[in-house]
Image (spheres, rainbow, N blue to C red):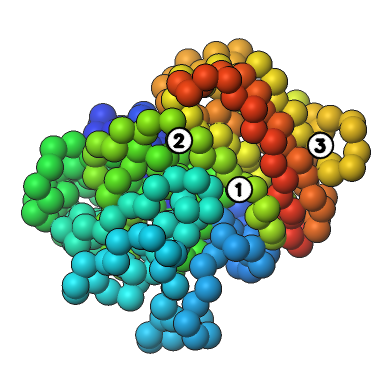
Amino acid sequence: MAMTSTATDAPGLTGASGVAGAAAQLPEAGAAGAAGEPLPPASTPASAGAAGEAQSVSVPPMAADAGSGASEPPLVAAPEGCAPPPDGASVEEINALNTVNTLRAAAGAPCVTLDLNIGKAAAAHCAYYALNKDSAPECTINPHYEVLGCPGYTGTTPSERMRAAGFASSGGGGEVMAFLNNPARAVQTWVDSVWHRIPILDPATTVMGYGSAEDCDTVDFGPNRRREGLSLVAYPYAGQIGVTTAFDGRYEGPMPPAPTTGWPSANPISLYGQQLVISEHQLFVEGDPTPVDHTWLDPTSPILPADQQSLLRNVVFMYANQPYLPNTTYRVRIAGTYAGGNLLREWTFTTGAPRRMRP
């Protein structure tokens, strides 16, 4: 299994959140893979895919249990205050939307809406990928870009495919892919990464569409037209439980800067805000005054390659150099300034069971 994301229509680039990037893969729950392939799944309940999942409030409650491969998936509950999906949306599309919005609401981001035409584009792209990945691998060298003349072609770039499907807007805010055919787990898998998390939780994201095929999930995003205002969006969010303990950046492309101790690290912590200038960033085990060593990423970080700096538009990341201790509460403290003035955010979250990592 794997996962990828793209954020621009620049040929050959994949990434997240409307900025250049590259394909990514996450470990187990996820499987290893080469850069340029979609990211893998995260294990459930104590993990959360590259977007996340686990005993945690991250994964919205479902109306009923369903075993793997059930013909009718259980319905993910909608968070309060979000617009309902449009008439005609499938259970899978509703589950993708409600999982995204539950995570966004908990983290402090406004709801996004579901566009069925974007979903048609995403579904057609998944069908293209599923059709060609084994029989014509030259058609899927970059999972986000289709090759004219290959079976199932509907457009080279995500924005071209969205326009072809009837989405009446120019441009796009990116694309993420996973190979699960499970919308809730795919969203969590994306959130439990670095670059793939960005468009899922970006407060500027306004509209999305979900499509799937055999072993494929795709979310395409419309252009980021919302004025971000003074929103501050943190993840893991305050009070979250069951947070995944580990992250292996070797399976994300572009690979984030490795901790000084090497991979795996802890699950990344992110904070979105306009005009962020951070002067203090600390992580503690709750009750212990000793700071936890961590890796810090902002556009000026000396360890960040130049081609990754544009990925950090109004968002910063930190990840402990070692995986989190299981079933442990951590405290985050970030201070500085942002568009709204002085910034001081301090919050806690609690990890879940250890995450099984692939060698």
Which one is in front, 17 or 146? 17
Looking at the image, residue 318 sits to the left or right of residue 84; the answer is right
Give residue 293's mark.
Answer: none
User: What residue sits 44% from the left and 25% below the top?
Assistant: 274
Alpha-carbon distance for marks 1 and 3?
15 Å
Q: Position of residue 273 (x, y in %)?
A: 48, 29
Q: Residue at x 74, y 53 (%)?
A: 350
Q: Earlier in the sequence, mark 2 or mark 1?
A: 2
> Who's the residue at 16% across and 49% down the image?
162
On the image, the x and y values in percent for residue 296 come to: 65, 25
Three-letter amino acid code at the position of disc 3: Phe
Disc nearer the start of the sequence (1/3): 1
Q: Secondary structure at mark 1?
A: loop
Residue assigned mark 1: 237
Secondary structure found at label 2: loop
Label 2 near label 3: C-beta < 8 Å?
no
Cα distance in 3D space between marks 3 and 2: 25 Å
In the rendered structure, are the residues bearing label 1 and label 3 in contact, judged by CB atoms less than 8 Å apart? Answer: no
Q: Which residue is mark 3?
A: 284
- Left/right of residue 94 with respect to residue 108 in the rendered view: left
Q: Which residue position is annotated with label 2?
A: 231
